[in-house]
Image (spheres, grey):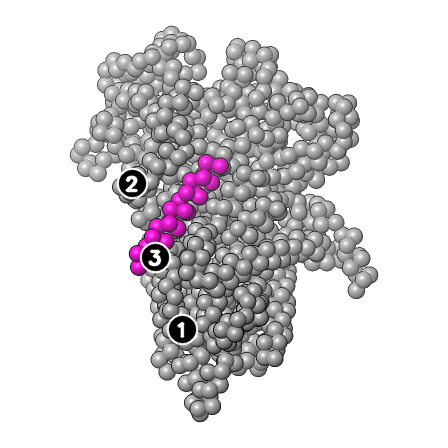
Amino acid sequence: MAVLAGRLLQLNPNLIDLNAILSTPSSTHLLGADDLGRSILARLLHGVEVSLLVACVVTILTMLLGVFIGLVAGFYGGRVDRLLMQITDIFLAFPGILLAIAFAAVLGPGLTNLTIALCMSGWVSYARLTRGQTLSLRNRQHVQAAESLGASVPRLIMVHILPLLSSILVVEATYSIASVMIAEASLSFLGLGIQAPDASWGGMLRDGVRYMLVAPHYVLVVGLSLMSLILAINLAGDYLRDQLDVRTEK
Amino acid sequence: MKMFNVFTAFCCTVLLMAVSSCRQSETTRPNNREIIFAVSQAPLNLDPRYATDAASARVNRLLYQSLVDFDAQSKPTASLASWQEISPRLYSFTLNKNRAPFHCADKSKWALISAYDVKATYDSFAFLKDSPHAAEFDNIKNIRVKDDNTVQFELKTADSHFAAKLIIGILPAALIAQHHDFSHDPVGSGSLSLVSWQHQLSLVRERDGQKISLQEVKDPTVRVLKLLHGEVDLLQGELPVELVQYLQTKPEVIVKTNIGANFSYLGLNMQDSVLKQLKVRQALAYAIDRNVMMQKVMVANTRAAGAILPPEHYTNQYSLPIYPYKPALARQLLLEAGVKLPLKLVYKTSTDAQRVRFATIMQAQMQPAGIQLEIRSLDWGTFFEDIKQGNFQLYGLTWVGIKTPEIYEKALGSNSMPPKGFNRGRYLDAQLDQYLLNDNWQAATARINSQLPYIPLWYEGQFAVMRKQIHHFSAKPDGNWDDLATISRYAH
Amino acid sequence: MIKRLIGLVTVVFGVLLVTFLLIHLVPGDPVEVMLGESASSADRVVLRAELGLNQPMIIQFGHYLQRLAHADFGLSIHSKTPIIELVKTRYPATLKLAFVSLLIGLGVGLPMGIFAALKAGKWQDLMVSLVSVRLSAMPAFWLGPMLMLIFAVWLGWLPVSGMEANTSIVLPALTLGLGLSAILTRMTRTSLLEVLNDDYIRTARAKGLSESHVIIHHALRAALLPIITIVGLQMGSLLAGTVITETIFSWDGIGRLLVESIEKRDYPVTQACVLLVALSYVLVNLFTDMLYQLADPRVKLVYAV
């Protein structure tokens, strides 16, 4: 494995070979070449880092922010809830695409601004989900009981509410990694993603679709890779959810 | 069981929809007689006084007639009218005797274009404050109608190229007076007229009633799929070369190619401290391998470019040298200019995948010359705004449909600094201005080619792909759609 | 109810304000777009004054709101069409596509989710999750052309794209609906399993009620909360227009209009689109909250919006 990886790492993802444009898999290009004759394998390996990094950073940031706001709104209810939900709604009602284009226009296109734009519209769904669940959990017997026994607010949230939320949040998070990867791909489709010559899986998938009639291997390789990765993330999420469930049972 | 019933209902609805849709598609095949043209960008505005985008300009050529048109060498020629230069400040136009009338639903009311219509059309620029073409006609002092067939333009200052500007489609005076909305309801006298404009632009040919529709299909792959499926009959340009070659292998379609006349180039910011130096610009010109790109990623008939106007243009009857790919020489020039290598430059382009692809190749080609190109692809609005504001180092663009040598003055003359003119790189060259003043095109193009305010790239080849039943349509060097006036479908 | 209406107005106002600020932040103004690059500075100044663009931003925003109050959206800069006309043709298209997509999403997602929950841990469950993950990993710009290739070019059943035929909606709706169904499958399965472990379900089971009775009358009802949330959110984004699907399928909806207006710097159109998107979002949200209370009587709080 290490030897293989070592060999792979020496592949240059940006090495253009105009004689190998869209060539099918061969000994020189194990998975074939893209529309500039670059090794698809090398670009997949290079691009997965970028795509995963963006997906993870966005997911973590949006989850932290969203869950916090959702918990506060759902737990306290009333005026606090109204205010926070109002803000959430403004973000949610605002077309994210406008935000993404505006960011690219003002700050220049690229990875950082892509991440910011995705974060700006991503936290909202966590906030909504968390708030909805918290509202419902807030009135359950065990929370009411703990409250009447004088448990502090952080304790109520950390011990009695958050654990019950965790499984649904983990599922949402694994989904969100997938959907952030696809959002990145979609922004790439609109040309607002990562800048050439760097690779991301979304950008590669877009290029693959462009040449699907003449070089089906390109879109097939990238599409299957993306599906496998997302499947793996989801399986990991399922495993994590089962673990968390066991803990709440105890 | 209520819930389950709901779900079953949902499933059934979906299934039913799928089934019924299959049946319907058998009966709702598109009308065989209509010819459908898939375009990447639909026209925006069919009022010739407002239209600026290429698609509108191309359709307007078919909807309206203009006083003047251009021949194969781009010399202005008589179209709706012939003209006489009475003096450099006074032009007289005589309308053709057997000219087509304005289209009108009621055929008995069809009226011939008269000199009054010409006057009304060009007079209207004086009060259209938001027309992008109004500035073109600032120089008109007054327009006099001599008789029904004759009209005279008097100018404020002498302009020997004035006739070539009168390419605006002529509108009926009566409707202009009523502030008719030509943008959506064009009334002209061209070979086509409007039927409806909802999801698609439906036109009819006056001569034989042939219906022709323009459908906007943005995605190149979808355009090809629709053509192969027979939903559209025709597409033109804007496909990667690989898809053109793929279509050439398909028996159900025909690919027609032609040379192109639209000039692609790299624009440079002449106020940039590095790009100001001639040697750096020369290095850039030598750091692009045009030949290999034309062979590998461009469509057939693409030609390397030396000047904005192509060799067949009447001002350009001599050949300019094409810069060869010499990365070592480029590196040498950069060092001579005292630039610290690698030289970092930012290259702005639109988000169009083909443009980004070309940019990526150039980026790789420039590397051995010691130039590190950073590509920034921006949405069209931002990109174009940055270009107009001079907020760039390098950018890539194409001049589409340019006919008159006035372009040299407008694009590179020192009197054409934005916001009044297209000298986006802020190029100042007294020598060039002098040549342009004397209409010395040979010296001017040579000067531009050696001073390199633009790095010339190529004239991309043109092509049109159509179902094999479609005849009498060919791709034109400037990409116009004039052959929609002759296109026809033969039954097989 | 009044509180909700106030909230509704606040959200729409907030969105309008943010849009207005963003538009002024991004380079490019309508006068430049209108006049191109050959007009004189004097002409520009005149036109700018005529359009009121020389006034302070806050006053411009005020004027804009004033016009809105009279239902005056203005004209498109490029096509000079009254924007109300544009919106009138574009929005129903988006509405139609969103509704059919949602139907497909629910029709596929809910049964699959319930099935997977019933068979939790068995091979059928695994199959369902494999399928739904695959669906969720397909971006519209990939799924769309694939569906076109299969159903239009190979099988010849449906048109590739466009809006002419009655059947044109099937492929874009499938593209959106299948993605949606993946999310719904997972959400349904997860929240059902969650609830199935709850005490009151155990009680219901202990009472000897049949498993399907337990699931439908007790579990599903409680599990509906997160499902409604997701459906509401998804419907909101469907109504915002789905730029990529609309672009690929040449579906003249509001999403495409919005993005094209931004690219062409046709700001009056942008503002009208954003307003519409915000309004539809707010209304969907209101509806979602009402469903919330219907679905779970335990939730008795009155929410804003």
Tell which circle, 3 or 1, labels the residue nearer the N-terminal end: 3
What's the mark number on residue C72?
2
Relative to residue A23, is residue B332 depicted above or below? above
Residue at x 54%, y 25% (from the top left corner): B424
Residue tagged 1: C298
- Is residue C4 highlighted in magenta? yes
Residue type at mark 3: give it: Arg
Residue tagged 3: C4
Residue type at mark 2: give it: Asp
Q: Position of residue B127 (x, y in %)?
A: 31, 22
Residue type at mark 1: give it: Arg
Relative to residue B271, is residue B110 depicted above or below? below
| Residue C68 horizontal side relative to residue B75, left or right | left
CA gap, disc 3 and disc 1? 20 Å
Tell which circle, 3 or 2, labels the residue nearer the N-terminal end: 3
CA gap, disc 2 and disc 1? 44 Å
Question: What range of the chain is rendered magenta?
Answer: C1-25
In what element is the residue under mark 2?
A: loop
Determine the residue located farthest toward the bottom in the rendered image: C208
Residue at x 71%, y 47% (from the top left corner): A14
Residue at x 36%, y 25% (from the top left corner): C49
**Chain under callout 3:** C
The crowding category of the residue bearing disc 1, from other C-alpha atoms within 10 Å (few below 14, some 14 to 19, many at least 20), is some
The crowding category of the residue bearing disc 3, from other C-alpha atoms within 10 Å (few below 14, some 14 to 19, many at least 20), is some
